[in-house]
Image (spheres, helix red, strand yellow):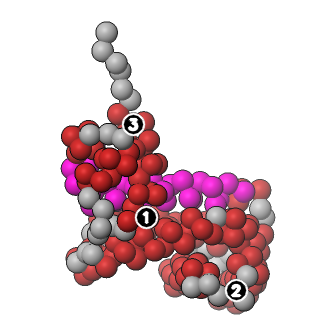
Amino acid sequence: MPKIVDHDLYRKELLDKCFDLFAEKGYASITMRQIAQGLGVSTGTLYHYFPNKKTLFEHLVENMMQRDISIATADWKTLKTRQERAEALGNYLNNNLAYHIKHSYLMIDFSQHQDSEGYSNSDFWKRLCERYKGVIYEFLGVEDIVLADFVMCFVDGVILEKALGVDTVNVVEQCALLGKMITAYVEKYHSDKE
């Protein structure tokens, strides 16, 4: 009797194993053949699930985003205030800093090797940004595009500072300060909407 394969589960398993391969070699340097070798599968198997490296990478990023969001927001339903959520974000980032630094390096590497103008307008990129902004709106308790962009820039900046080896930046303290700043901003500019 032929083996029954859950293709969605198998695709996810392949993606889960790809992150370190991309992080180690960089998007531009690694080939589909090297990825297949690193995963212990044939190139034919890899191409069956992903028609090219860009598609594989996009699926990898979406898979990572879903996982990251699930982990980072797991406590939010029990946390009542923005301040508590900001502190939880700080703890999450701090506890997973090495992973987020690798992820940031990989996204920068990927972006360097794309048609930046065309890619930033792609459905993939728009979907990714909208999903992150939706999570930030939930985090803030208010839909404010400028504030959501600020939070994304803040998180990227804190991770970059740690990647550069800046020891004076304490992720937990910075996120606690972020919580205070957001609370003050929302109270001042959104009090009539709440």
Indicate the position of residue 186 as horizontal and vertical percent values: 68, 83
Amino acid type assigned to the residue bearing label 2 in the image: Asp
Q: What is the CA distance from the residue labelled 2 to the residue labelled 1?
A: 24 Å
- Mark nearest the camera among 2 and 1 is 1
Amino acid type assigned to the residue bearing label 3 in the image: Tyr
- Mark nearest the camera among 3 and 2 is 2
Please give the residue where the numbered disc 2 appears in the rendered image: 167
Residues packed near mark 2 inside 10 Å, few (<14), some (14 to 19) or many (20 plus): few
Of labels 3 and 2, earlier in sequence is 3
The stretch of residues the image draws in magenta is 48-75
Q: What is the CA distance from the residue labelled 3 to the residue labelled 1?
A: 22 Å
Q: Is residue 71 magenta?
A: yes
Q: Secondary structure at mark 3?
A: helix
Please give the residue where the numbered disc 3 appears in the rendered image: 10
Residues packed near mark 3 inside 10 Å, few (<14), some (14 to 19) or many (20 plus): few
Q: Is residue 118 magenta?
A: no
The majority secondary structure of the magenta stretch comes to helix
The one nearer the camera, 168 or 79, is 168
Residue at 46%, 48% (x, y): give it. Answer: 16
Q: Secondary structure at mark 1?
A: helix
Of labels 3 and 1, earlier in sequence is 3
Residue at 31%, 79% (x, y): give it. Answer: 112
The answer to whether residue 82 is visible is no
Residue 113 occupies which quadrant of the picture? bottom left
Residue 54 occupies which quadrant of the picture? bottom left
Please give the residue where the numbered disc 1 appears in the rendered image: 24
